[in-house]
Amino acid sequence: ADKRAAGDIDDAIRHFNWALRINPECATCLKDLSEAHASAGRFDEAEIALRKALALLPRDSDALFNLGTILSSKGMHNAAIDAYAASAEVNPNDVELLYNLGVKFGERNDRVNEIEAYERALKVQPQFTKASLNLGAAFADIGDDIKAETHWLTAAVNPDTCKPALQNLAMLYEQRAAKAIRSLNSATTKDQAIAIAINTDAILASAQSTIERIIYEFSDSTWSSRLLRVLKTRGRVIAVSDIEQAITHLLKATELDSSDASVWLALKQAYTLTGNTVKASHAYEMASKCAAPSH
């Protein structure tokens, strides 16, 4: 084991084989030999050694877990699931094991068992946010965005899973907003349109604050274009009920990207509706400059 830890894998393998010649039924030696082979990418040899260990200790949870990992590395995903499931029967409170089991079910698109595995892990350790993150994705895949949101919000609390959770939440809010906008476009009365616009703007506000966290907390400017899109959409949506608030969103969009002619044109329309012809004229000039070909 010391040789393996020092990085001398071949020498470690020779040492374990020597120990096994002395005691062929040393399960610990067989497990160590398997781990050494696996660390060198020799997964067939690792599996053989581990199955010999399991023949001696069939309810060894660690050995079953490692077998699942080896089988997964060999692309034998169904067999890996069986190994993880057997390990979970022996050690039902191992959250990493339950997490890996959930991942394997997810790869097989078995959402029912995937969700069950992650929920079992979270029952043991409620703050195990790796499971929360994947559980949210599993619920999103079956169309339950409420549960997806709940689990992603939990995952966003942990720095290790915060960014992917926020990214998932942002996309979820954008999808909700797109659905709400379709309802807005089919509104039949002004009161109905105003109510839908206010609700849609609240959804977009969630998208905006989430994207801003991604950009500023993680210094990820790749999301700036999405923030711009959300601000433009908020401006156009809320104009149905609150033109001044629409102007606020559109102005913030120009701060993010002053070269977007469509934002200036939207501002021109908004200022025109308020009777502010001076600002409307300025917004139109800016839109014209943005649209003009560069020399």
Image (cartoon, rainbow, N blue to C red):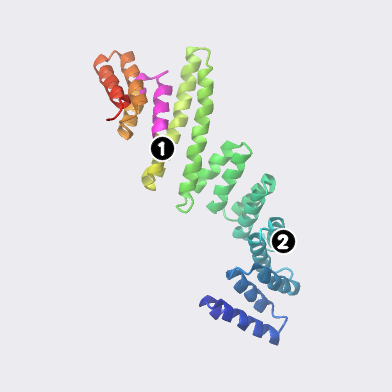
Q: Identify which amino acid the numbered label 2 is placed on.
A: Ala
State the residue at coordinates (67%, 71%).
45
Q: Nearer the viewer, residue 40 or 271?
A: 40
Q: Nearer the viewer, residue 293 or 82?
A: 293
The kind of secondary structure element at disc 2 is helix
- Most common SS among magenta residues: helix
Q: Is residue 163 above or below residue 42?
A: above
Quadrant, the C terminus: top left
Does residue 108 show up?
yes
The reply to whether discs 2 and 1 touch (Cβ–Cβ < 8 Å) is no
Of labels 2 and 1, earlier in sequence is: 2
What label does residue 209 carry, if any? Answer: 1
Crowd rating for badge 2 (residues with CA inside 10 Å; few <14, some 14–19, many 20+): some
The kind of secondary structure element at disc 1 is helix
Give the extent of the magenta segment. Answer: 228-246
Quadrant, the N terminus: bottom right
State the residue at coordinates (34%, 25%).
261
Q: Residue 69's spot in the image, x, y percent?
A: 64, 62
In the picture of the structure, the residue carrying the numbered disc 2 is 86
Q: Identify which amino acid the numbered label 1 is placed on.
A: Ser
Does residue 156 show up?
no
Residue reaching furthest left? 278
State the residue at coordinates (37%, 24%).
262
Q: Quadrant of residue 248?
A: top left
State the residue at coordinates (57%, 37%).
146
Residue reaching furthest front? 295
Q: Is residue 18 above or below residue 153?
A: below
Crowd rating for badge 1 (residues with CA inside 10 Å; few <14, some 14–19, many 20+): some
Residue reaching furthest bottom? 22
